[in-house]
Image: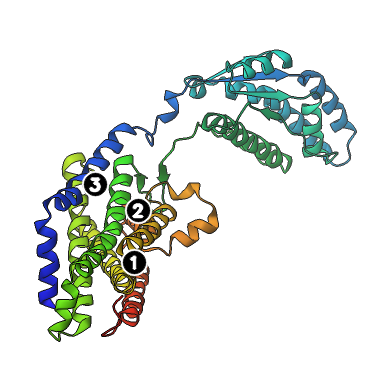
Amino acid sequence: MLTFLMKDLLLFWRDRKEVLTVILLPLVLVVVLSISMAGLFDENQSDNYDLALSLVMEDHQSKAIEEFKASVHQSDRIPDNGKQEVIAGVEEHPPVESLMDFLTSPELENWLTVETMSKGEAKERIENGESNAMLLIPEGYTAQLLKNIYLDQGTAPSLQFSAKETAVEVDMIHDVIDGFLEQLNLQYVVSMSGGEVSMNQVEHPEGGTEVVDNDHSFSLTMDQYFALSIGALFVLFMASTVASRTGIEKREHTFNRIALTNTPGLHFLFGKTCATFVLSLLQILLIFIGSHLILGVFSERSFTFWMGMIFMASVYALAIAGLSSIMTSVSLRLKNPDAADGIFMTILMVFGTIGGNFIPIYVLPNWLQQIGEWTPNGLTLAILIEWLQFEDVSTLWLPAIRLLGLTLIAIGVSTMLYPRRGEIS
């Protein structure tokens, strides 16, 4: 088997074009994509936006509050000793005025411009592209909101938010307004029970930043994501690269000459499997180390971090080797090597898509994300991102066992599919 391993490694090394492609192409992609999409996950990302919101005011807040005060004095639902506190709380933080103050606050004015206008003018500005969205505060909103919260009368009112088309900018504005209203409603509900809640400052979204339980702040940068995803993707293609050489060896009758030497057939299969493991491990390590040396993607990381990366890279390389063994057995059974290569590439493209190597995994449906985590590349990418965030050794064991299980299953299947003497197509 060692002889076949050395054969495949030497054949790969002699193809200098393939060697340069395996080494340089993924690094070039990491650098180009990281530079072209730099700042996408930056904390001050929203400051780069210049968004406009058209506000349509049809509600009469002062009149509604006066009516609410009269309703509170007549209500039996609120204790007499708490009526004045409820009225004072509403007067201090009237809902519409609080929303207006928030939308025009210094925290939002750097990226969001709010203008009050009529409904017709707002629709016209949206159609002309002069405004990203329209927020309409309908007549009776304040009165209905306060009666629903404090007097348990009627249903909770809603604001009317509309835009010409769905876009990231529109979602940002909607999420900011929705988050503020949730806090405002919480303040009213808690004050109803006699408590006091200070309005927390609501900031605009900061993509890519998470605060975890151990107070460790983590920001996944684009260069880190591309280094991990492209590394996993190109190693996935290594399975097809090695297996495709089986078709060449069939066409050149190399395999037939090997069979005539009475060498155990499985030595040929396991030689390619081991060669795939060695080449896959070297490639993914070169991508990680090269990306770090060029872009500093893993700067200030501990020795434990690098050991975890090497461990997961090794387990992933084993899974890819198992996948390559199946492809090798299938190639020996199919008459047309080109058809085999086409099938393998289609399968790998599907794996790359649902595994999050071509597009971020979160844009896919939940059921497809769950399937993607059962692909070797999808599982490896997910655990590497988690390892990059937490560096918790306990998180590595279960994914590693799953990858090793997939490896054993793949080798078992490839052994059963491997053609016996006289069965080569």
Q: What type is the residue that disc 1 sits on? A: Ser
Q: Provide the secondary structure element on which disc 1 rests.
A: helix
Residue at point 67% right, 24% down? 135
Q: In front: mark 1 or mark 2?
A: 2
Query: Which callout, 2 or 3, points at the residue further toward the start of the chain?
Result: 3
Q: What type is the residue that disc 3 sits on? A: Pro
Tell me if residue 137 can be seen: yes
Give the image location of residue 391, x and y in percent.
30, 57
Residue annotated with mark 1: 394
Residue at point 13% right, 74% down? 4
Q: Quadrant of the C terminus?
A: bottom left
Give the image location of residue 115, x and y in percent.
62, 14
Give the image location of residue 225, x and y in percent.
33, 46
Query: Which callout, 1 or 3, points at the residue further toward the start of the chain?
Result: 3
State if disc 3 and disc 1 touch (CB < 8 Å). no
Give the image location of residue 369, x and y in percent.
48, 56
- The dot on residue 385 is 2
- The dot on residue 26 is 3
Tell me if residue 94 can be seen: no
